[in-house]
Image (cartoon, rainbow, N blue to C red):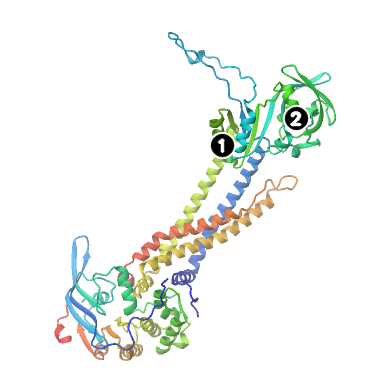
Amino acid sequence: MQDTPVTPASPVKVELEKPVVQLSHVHKSFNVGESTEVEVLHGIDMVLNAGEFVAVMGPSGSGKSTLLNLVGLLDRPTQGQLLITGMETTQLDDHGLTQLRGRSIGFVFQYHHLIGAFSALENVMLPMVGLQGYPTAAIEARALSLIESVGLTPWRDTPATLLSGGQQQRVAVARALIMQPALLLADEPTGNLDTQSANAVFDLFRQVNREHGTAVLFVTHNPELAHRCDRTIQVIDGLVPDNEAAW
Amino acid sequence: MLLGRFQPFEWIVSTRFLREGRMQSLFIIVGIAIGVAVIVFMSALLQGLQSNLVKRVLTAQAHIQVLPPKEQVRILHGLDTALHKDQVQAPLQRLKSIDQWQAVLTMLRAMPEVRVASPSVSGSTLITRGAASRSLSLTAVDLALYQQIINLSEKIVAGHARLGASDIMIGTELAADLGLSVGDKLLVQSATGVSNYFVISGILDLGNKGANQRAGYVSLRSGQSLLGYPGGVTVIDLTVNDVYAAELVAQRIQALTHLQADSWIKTNAQFFSAVKSQSLANTAIRFFVGLSVAFGIASVLVVSVVQRSKEIGILRAMGISRAQVMRVFLLQGGLLGLGGAVVGCALGALFLQLWLLMSRSADGAPMFAVVMDTVMLIEALALATLTGLLAALAPALRAARLDPVVAIRG
């Protein structure tokens, strides 16, 4: 257990235009078999500022998820520099990456991936309980307010597995926000939802982005939703061809 | 609050995981419980059986007997005489007193391992009543001290455990053979020709027909004068604190005093070997049952890690450290072990009660005392928990090492 209570990393009022993510000549390769190495990302440069809402598009296998995993500190670049909230991450050990990830980055995945053994409210509380070491009234209060903000108060005690797809995704968004992260990463969060639910979830991201200035990287195949973002980057064959134009 | 306030994160997650897979948890707990119950039941039963056997052996003899050293042949080697071992005749072992026995007794009593030391004289005599006579293996003791080693009062079937100057206590068979009862007089003659009249103060049942036919007890002073050891003793009987350490203590005494020291372990080598074999078999059973319990826990947790790999990936993405993930799975192993052990101890106690009810001797009394030792139960709980933790080590490491990207992708 930690000695000091955990507080969300970023302030509610963020300094806009301050870079949250900076990638410089980032390459990523994977070993396929014993001697074959396949490069998936071929030197990506990009900057994502606080308060920006950016869509990431591209065909399947182009490297979108790999890019998201690198930015989310779930994986390490083979080459290049990656700064999150101004901190150089390539030299951090696993513990350092985990700490930074927990405090600064929120994830929402396509298949919502809630922990089935917990209720909606408990799922939202989990990241902060994990970092704090134990639950407190403050954590519960914050989780309750997030559950309310995603409109799920009546379902707060419902087991995660009994919620509908749209509801689960809203819980996932609330969970991603509990630490008030500087960066929200969404990997096709609407890909598995009907249009109405997809729009509701997208609006939720937009609301969070506007109200808290949270930078959002939103991977989607839906051009309509991408159009509603501040800007869109295309990832094609591990490159961002219109890099300059996009950024 | 649904999550118990101030409960550690790892505790919350591991208990929820166990509760969510309740059928899996239940089956493995039942499996562990059966294993622990077998261990508890077997251990208590064998411990009871062994204690009973050892008690029976040790109620009739001292833990250690200190005797005068055996006489050795001293060979004078001639320069041109080839001497073969088969030409050496073993010397006669004369009965003799322990040299400086009071000093030896004081030294033995000062040893921390020794509980009681009692000097005695023993020898063969002839007992005569009218025209009948029988051989008598006579032991002369200081009754107050000797009673602390072999409780003769418990063995009295007629009369009292009392050894005055002219008192004698004899075995039941001998009394029956010679038609003797308490208060009767008899003549006891030693091998040296010294004889004395004694009055029977008590008749003993020593639990063995041979002993009841031959054994007799007189006071130390009477025995010393009858057997020809005025002021001397031929044996010092000892009891020690740890009966199973008797051989080690005997060896130490032998090294310190250069006297012969025979432990009950040495004089009952076959019996002790049987007891040791039984203990070994018990340990082997416990080990293999423990091993199967460990593999049971490990297999359930390995499956759990595979089933929960996505959840583990999500937890890691949330900022949960590898160490926390590892603790979640270790705790599950420990909890399964502890839960199984609690149920297992209760089951073991139940089996023992049933066994005690079913296995009774002809008079309805239990065949031997079986006690559920609290220490053994605590040991079983601790060992099962430890086994659970150790068994969970490999799955926990596997969970902690999961690549979150691969885990989330499934």
B8 is higher (above) or lower (below) than B383:
below
Foreground of the two, B213 or B158: B158
Which label belongs to residue B219?
2
Asked which secondary structure carries label 2, the reply is strand
For the image shown, how many numbered marks are present on the structure?
Answer: 2
Q: Please name the residue that numbered disc 1 is placed on.
A: B249
Instruction: Name the residue at 54% across, 58% down.
Output: B381
Displayed quadrant of residue B380: bottom right
Q: Position of residue A123 (x, y in %)?
A: 42, 79
Q: Residues within 10 Å of mark 2 (few under 14, many from 20)?
A: many
CB-based contact (under 8 Å), mark 1 and mark 2:
no
Q: Residue furthest right?
A: B183
Q: Amino acid at mark 1?
A: Val
* Horizontal side, residue B154 vs residue B49: left or right: right
* Horizontal side, residue B162 vs residue B403: left or right: right
**Chain ID of residue with mark 2:** B
Asked which secondary structure carries label 1, the reply is helix
Q: Position of residue A195 (x, y in %)?
A: 33, 89
Query: Alpha-carbon distance for marks 1 and 2?
Result: 28 Å
Quadrant assignment for the C terminus of chain B: bottom left
* Horizontal side, residue B303 vs residue A71: left or right: right
